Image (spheres, grey):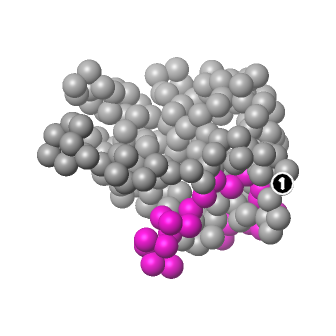
Amino acid sequence: MEFIDVILSRKSVRSFSEEEIPENVLNEMLEAARLSPSSQNRQCWRFIVVQNKETRERLALKSGLIGKVNFFIKDAPVIIVACADPSKSVKLNKQNYYLVDIAIAFQQMMLAAWNHGVGSCWLAAFDEQKVKDILNIPDNIRVVAMSPFGYPKEKASLYDKALKTFAGSKKRLDLNKIIMWEKWGKY
Protein backbone atom coordinates (compact mmCIF):
# COMPACT_ATOMS: atom_id res chain seq x y z
CA MET A 1 0.00 0.00 0.00
CA GLU A 2 1.07 3.59 -0.56
CA PHE A 3 1.58 5.33 2.77
CA ILE A 4 -1.26 7.80 2.24
CA ASP A 5 -3.56 4.84 1.52
CA VAL A 6 -2.60 3.32 4.88
CA ILE A 7 -3.59 6.56 6.61
CA LEU A 8 -6.79 7.07 4.60
CA SER A 9 -8.05 3.51 5.06
CA ARG A 10 -7.09 2.85 8.70
CA LYS A 11 -10.03 2.41 11.04
CA SER A 12 -10.66 1.05 14.51
CA VAL A 13 -11.37 -2.68 14.42
CA ARG A 14 -13.43 -4.44 17.09
CA SER A 15 -14.22 -7.74 15.33
CA PHE A 16 -11.27 -10.05 14.79
CA SER A 17 -10.76 -13.28 12.89
CA GLU A 18 -8.89 -16.16 14.51
CA GLU A 19 -5.98 -15.80 12.07
CA GLU A 20 -2.66 -15.41 13.86
CA ILE A 21 -0.35 -12.50 13.11
CA PRO A 22 2.84 -13.81 11.46
CA GLU A 23 5.99 -13.26 13.52
CA ASN A 24 7.62 -11.08 10.84
CA VAL A 25 4.57 -8.77 10.76
CA LEU A 26 4.47 -8.52 14.57
CA ASN A 27 8.20 -7.75 14.62
CA GLU A 28 7.74 -5.03 11.98
CA MET A 29 4.97 -3.46 14.07
CA LEU A 30 7.18 -3.45 17.17
CA GLU A 31 10.13 -2.11 15.20
CA ALA A 32 7.98 0.77 13.92
CA ALA A 33 7.30 1.75 17.55
CA ARG A 34 10.95 1.36 18.52
CA LEU A 35 12.06 3.70 15.74
CA SER A 36 9.56 6.45 16.57
CA PRO A 37 10.76 9.83 17.78
CA SER A 38 10.62 10.67 21.48
CA SER A 39 11.32 13.75 23.55
CA GLN A 40 15.10 14.14 23.81
CA ASN A 41 15.30 10.57 22.45
CA ARG A 42 14.58 9.27 25.96
CA GLN A 43 12.58 6.29 24.63
CA CYS A 44 10.52 5.99 27.80
CA TRP A 45 8.05 3.56 26.24
CA ARG A 46 7.72 -0.11 27.04
CA PHE A 47 5.29 -2.50 25.35
CA ILE A 48 3.85 -5.73 26.70
CA VAL A 49 2.81 -8.17 23.96
CA VAL A 50 0.07 -10.46 25.27
CA GLN A 51 -0.69 -13.56 23.22
CA ASN A 52 -1.78 -15.96 25.96
CA LYS A 53 -5.53 -16.58 25.64
CA GLU A 54 -6.23 -16.63 29.39
CA THR A 55 -4.36 -13.36 29.94
CA ARG A 56 -6.20 -11.72 27.03
CA GLU A 57 -9.50 -12.83 28.58
CA ARG A 58 -8.48 -11.43 31.98
CA LEU A 59 -7.57 -8.09 30.37
CA ALA A 60 -10.88 -8.08 28.50
CA LEU A 61 -13.14 -9.02 31.38
CA LYS A 62 -11.34 -8.04 34.58
CA SER A 63 -9.80 -4.64 33.93
CA GLY A 64 -12.47 -2.81 35.91
CA LEU A 65 -16.03 -1.65 35.41
CA ILE A 66 -15.03 0.90 32.80
CA GLY A 67 -13.09 -1.87 31.04
CA LYS A 68 -16.20 -4.02 30.55
CA VAL A 69 -16.75 -2.25 27.23
CA ASN A 70 -13.52 -3.86 26.05
CA PHE A 71 -14.78 -7.45 26.17
CA PHE A 72 -14.15 -7.76 22.41
CA ILE A 73 -10.36 -7.63 22.84
CA LYS A 74 -10.28 -11.23 24.04
CA ASP A 75 -10.92 -12.35 20.44
CA ALA A 76 -7.82 -10.64 19.03
CA PRO A 77 -4.74 -12.87 18.77
CA VAL A 78 -2.57 -10.14 20.31
CA ILE A 79 -3.10 -7.35 22.81
CA ILE A 80 -0.33 -4.81 23.22
CA VAL A 81 -0.19 -2.72 26.37
CA ALA A 82 1.66 0.58 25.95
CA CYS A 83 3.47 1.64 29.10
CA ALA A 84 5.82 4.45 30.00
CA ASP A 85 8.41 5.16 32.65
CA PRO A 86 7.81 8.84 33.46
CA SER A 87 11.24 9.10 35.11
CA LYS A 88 12.81 8.37 31.72
CA SER A 89 10.83 11.17 30.07
CA VAL A 90 10.84 14.95 30.30
CA LYS A 91 8.38 17.54 31.49
CA LEU A 92 8.30 20.69 29.38
CA ASN A 93 5.78 23.53 29.41
CA LYS A 94 4.12 21.82 32.40
CA GLN A 95 3.37 18.78 30.23
CA ASN A 96 4.49 15.20 30.72
CA TYR A 97 5.93 14.15 27.39
CA TYR A 98 5.77 10.43 28.06
CA LEU A 99 2.13 10.68 26.93
CA VAL A 100 3.20 12.22 23.62
CA ASP A 101 6.02 9.72 23.18
CA ILE A 102 3.66 6.76 23.71
CA ALA A 103 1.09 8.27 21.34
CA ILE A 104 3.65 8.64 18.55
CA ALA A 105 5.10 5.15 19.03
CA PHE A 106 1.72 3.43 19.31
CA GLN A 107 0.37 5.22 16.24
CA GLN A 108 3.42 4.17 14.22
CA MET A 109 2.84 0.60 15.39
CA MET A 110 -0.83 0.77 14.36
CA LEU A 111 -0.01 2.17 10.92
CA ALA A 112 2.64 -0.52 10.36
CA ALA A 113 0.06 -3.13 11.37
CA TRP A 114 -2.60 -1.73 9.05
CA ASN A 115 -0.11 -1.78 6.18
CA HIS A 116 -0.31 -5.59 6.54
CA GLY A 117 -4.09 -5.62 7.02
CA VAL A 118 -3.82 -6.03 10.81
CA GLY A 119 -6.45 -3.99 12.62
CA SER A 120 -6.24 -2.29 16.00
CA CYS A 121 -8.31 -0.15 18.33
CA TRP A 122 -6.77 2.39 20.70
CA LEU A 123 -8.17 1.80 24.20
CA ALA A 124 -8.10 4.05 27.23
CA ALA A 125 -11.19 2.69 29.01
CA PHE A 126 -9.52 0.45 31.57
CA ASP A 127 -8.61 0.45 35.23
CA GLU A 128 -4.86 1.06 35.22
CA GLN A 129 -4.27 -0.65 38.56
CA LYS A 130 -6.13 -3.79 37.52
CA VAL A 131 -4.11 -3.96 34.28
CA LYS A 132 -0.93 -3.54 36.33
CA ASP A 133 -2.01 -6.35 38.65
CA ILE A 134 -2.79 -8.72 35.78
CA LEU A 135 0.54 -8.06 34.04
CA ASN A 136 2.80 -7.53 37.09
CA ILE A 137 3.62 -3.96 36.06
CA PRO A 138 5.62 -2.02 38.69
CA ASP A 139 4.05 0.95 40.48
CA ASN A 140 6.42 3.50 38.89
CA ILE A 141 5.31 2.55 35.36
CA ARG A 142 2.21 4.12 33.79
CA VAL A 143 -0.17 2.17 31.57
CA VAL A 144 -1.10 4.72 28.90
CA ALA A 145 -3.07 2.66 26.38
CA MET A 146 -3.89 -0.82 25.13
CA SER A 147 -4.86 -2.16 21.76
CA PRO A 148 -5.99 -5.49 20.38
CA PHE A 149 -4.30 -6.43 17.11
CA GLY A 150 -5.62 -8.90 14.57
CA TYR A 151 -7.05 -9.40 11.13
CA PRO A 152 -10.58 -7.97 10.84
CA LYS A 153 -13.50 -10.35 10.46
CA GLU A 154 -15.17 -10.23 7.08
CA LYS A 155 -18.36 -9.02 8.73
CA ALA A 156 -18.19 -6.55 11.62
CA SER A 157 -20.01 -7.48 14.81
CA LEU A 158 -23.17 -5.68 15.86
CA TYR A 159 -21.19 -4.19 18.79
CA ASP A 160 -18.55 -2.86 16.38
CA LYS A 161 -21.20 -1.27 14.15
CA ALA A 162 -23.06 0.24 17.11
CA LEU A 163 -19.92 1.72 18.64
CA LYS A 164 -18.81 3.24 15.33
CA THR A 165 -22.23 4.82 14.92
CA PHE A 166 -22.31 6.07 18.52
CA ALA A 167 -18.78 7.49 18.32
CA GLY A 168 -19.31 9.00 14.88
CA SER A 169 -16.08 7.36 13.77
CA LYS A 170 -16.42 8.42 10.13
CA LYS A 171 -16.99 12.10 10.94
CA ARG A 172 -13.93 14.28 10.47
CA LEU A 173 -13.74 18.04 10.64
CA ASP A 174 -12.88 19.78 7.39
CA LEU A 175 -9.35 21.16 7.13
CA ASN A 176 -10.71 24.71 7.11
CA LYS A 177 -12.10 24.06 10.62
CA ILE A 178 -8.80 22.90 12.15
CA ILE A 179 -6.04 24.74 10.27
CA MET A 180 -5.20 28.36 11.00
CA TRP A 181 -2.62 30.32 9.08
CA GLU A 182 0.03 32.45 10.76
CA LYS A 183 -1.89 33.03 14.03
CA TRP A 184 -4.83 31.78 16.09
CA GLY A 185 -8.22 32.51 14.55
CA LYS A 186 -6.98 33.23 11.04
CA TYR A 187 -8.63 30.51 8.93
- Name the residue nearer the viewer: 151 or 181: 181
Find residue 104 and report its horizontal and vertical position in percent.
40, 48
Q: At x 71% / y 65%, what residue is drawn?
A: 151
Please tell me whether residue 101 is drawn above or below residue 156 in the rendered image.
above
Magenta region's main secondary structure? loop
Q: What element does badge 1 sit on?
A: loop
Which residue reaches farthest right?
A: 158
- Residue stretch rendered in magenta on the structure: 1-23
Q: Is residue 184 above or below residue 35?
A: above
Left or right side of 64 for 43: left
Q: Position of residue 144 (x, y in %)?
A: 51, 33
Q: Residue at x 71, y 41 (%)?
A: 166
Residue 47 seen: yes
| Residue name at image x 27 percent, y 30 percent | 90
The local crowd at label 1, few if under 14, some if 14 to 19, many if 20 or more residues have their Cα within 10 Å, is some
Q: Quadrant of residue 91?
A: top left
State the image coordinates of residue 171 (x, y, percent, origin top left): 56, 50
> Disc 1 designates what residue?
157
Of residues 12 and 169, which is closer to you in this image?
169
Q: Amino acid at mark 1?
A: Ser
Q: Residue at x 22, y 27 (%)?
A: 92
Q: Quadrant of residue 96?
A: top left
Q: Is residue 133 visible?
A: no
Q: Position of residue 154 (x, y in %)?
A: 80, 69
